Amino acid sequence: MRIDSYKFGEIIIEGVKYNHDVIIFPDKVKSNWWRKNGHNLCDEDIKEILDYKPDVLIIGKGKYGIMRVPDELIKKLKGMGIDVIVANTDKAVVLYNESKVEEKVGAFHLTC
């Protein structure tokens, strides 16, 4: 899947506009991604991603990088053999589109 564009509060993926946080799997988009603790990512928030076991997980922390991704979570993911890339959503979108890895997942916070 390819991200066509991103701006604060909006992402367009394969021509479809989303106004809520999303998880992009190779074959589908999970729209309206909701996190238990809002701006603090935890295991429960990415259970579906953990079950999928991608080679790469690209996390967009929001336009201004407000969503916190704890070091312990990154360490856990890496221990599972998942490469983790964390960046503000603008940069994460670019990295997602540039990645040649087929088994990648992107989790994007679209606002703050």
Image (cartoon, rainbow, N blue to C red):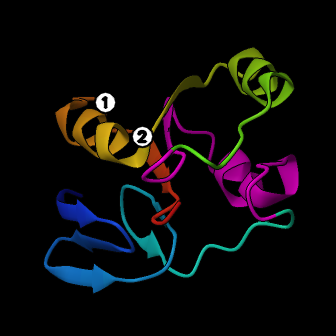
User: Which residue is at 46% across, 47% downward?
Assistant: 105
Q: Residues within 10 Å of mark 2 (few under 14, many from 20)?
A: many
Q: Position of residue 59 (x, y in %)?
A: 52, 42
Residue shown at the point (78%, 56%) measured from the top left: 47
Q: Is residue 7 left or right of residue 98?
A: right
Disc 1, SS: loop
Q: Are marks 2 and 1 in contact (CB under 8 Å)?
A: yes
Amino acid type shown at disc 1: Val
As displayed, is residue 3 above or below residue 30? above
Q: Identify which residue is drawn at 31% across, 37% down.
A: 91
Q: Residues within 10 Å of mark 1 (few under 14, many from 20)?
A: few
In the rendered image, residue 103, in percent from the top left (x then y), is placed at 41, 39
Q: How far across and down, in percent of the image, does residue 85 sit? A: 49, 27
Q: Secondary structure at mark 2?
A: strand
Front residue of 12/99: it is: 12
Say which amino acid is labelled 2.
Lys
Report, in whole angstroms, how far the alpha carbon at label 2 lies from the one at label 1: 6 Å
Residue placed most toward the observer, 35 or 2: 35
82 to the left or right of 96: right
Q: Which residue is mark 2?
A: 104
Residue 2 lies, with reference to residue 104, above or below; the image says below
Rendered view: 84 above or below 24:
above
Q: Is residue 11 highlighted in magenta?
A: no
Q: How many marks?
A: 2
Residue 1 location, quadrant:
bottom left
57 in magenta: yes
Q: Which mark is residue 72?
A: none
Observer-nearest of 103 and 110: 110
Q: Which residues are magenta?
A: 38-64
Q: Which residue is mark 1?
A: 101
Measuring from the top left, give residue 65's x and y in whole percent.
Answer: 54, 43
Instruction: Identify the residue at image location x=84%, y=48%.
Output: 42
